[in-house]
Image: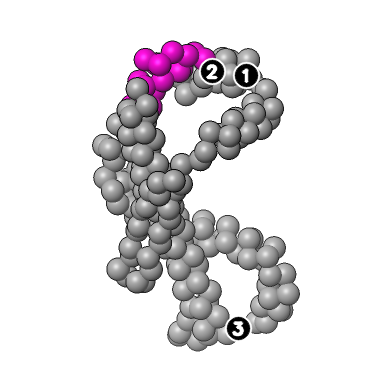
Amino acid sequence: MPHHPAICHSGVLGIELSCSWVAPSESETVRSRTRARASMEVGGLDSEGRQFKNADEMWTEHVGDPTKKTEWYSQGVGYWEGVEASVDGVLGGYGHLSDADIKGSEAFLSILLSERFPKASAATSQRHLVALGTLSLSFCVNNIYIYIYIYIYIHIYTCVCVCARARARASKSQAELSY
């Protein structure tokens, strides 16, 4: 089976993330579609606001014949080819974190961390740290971890998008070979 690799490298932290996508076999694809069909028997709207009874009806409308299918996938590939291969490009121009973003992320991560590590959060909430003229060590350490989490999350998200782009190109070339 052919592997389709994608690698992202971060020079700041020296982190290299890699993934390799293997094309699924025909039987795996059929099993996956069967499971997905069973779980997707609810109605909804497509990205253009049209109402559909279920996912099958939507897909029949969008990719019912080979011409529509090729057009639909080409639009997706075309979109990602037009996006700059950077954090800012993948995040739609939101690659820079403002103070409001950081504070919101800090609050969100605090909730997650307190749920994940309840003993640690209970111990720190009972401590009263005082810092006169300087930042407390606890505050600095917590913020460093939050910035690292955010930084790693953005780079993993970028790698996932790069992997998706590699999969789309591989699927497109595989589809062209099968015609």
From the top left corner, tell me how far across and down residue 64 is, in percent.
47, 14
Q: Nearer the viewer, mark 1 or mark 3?
A: 1
Q: Quadrant of residue 11?
A: bottom left
**Structural distance between the alpha carbons of marks 1 and 3:** 56 Å
Kindly state the secondary structure of the residue where label 3 is placed.
Answer: loop
Residue that numbered label 1 is attached to: 54
Kind of residue at badge 3: Leu
Is residue 168 visible to the viewer in this orientation of the structure?
yes
Q: Residue at x 33, y 38 (%)?
A: 169
Residue that numbered label 2 is attached to: 58
Which disc number belongs to residue 84?
none
Kind of residue at badge 2: Met
10 Å crowding of disc 2: few (<14), some (14-19), many (20+): some
79 vs 52, left or right, is: left
Residue that numbered label 3 is attached to: 129
Q: Is residue 45 above or below residue 28?
A: above
> In terms of sequence position, does the residue under pointer 3 or pointer 2 come before the other?
2
**Structural distance between the alpha carbons of marks 3 and 2:** 57 Å
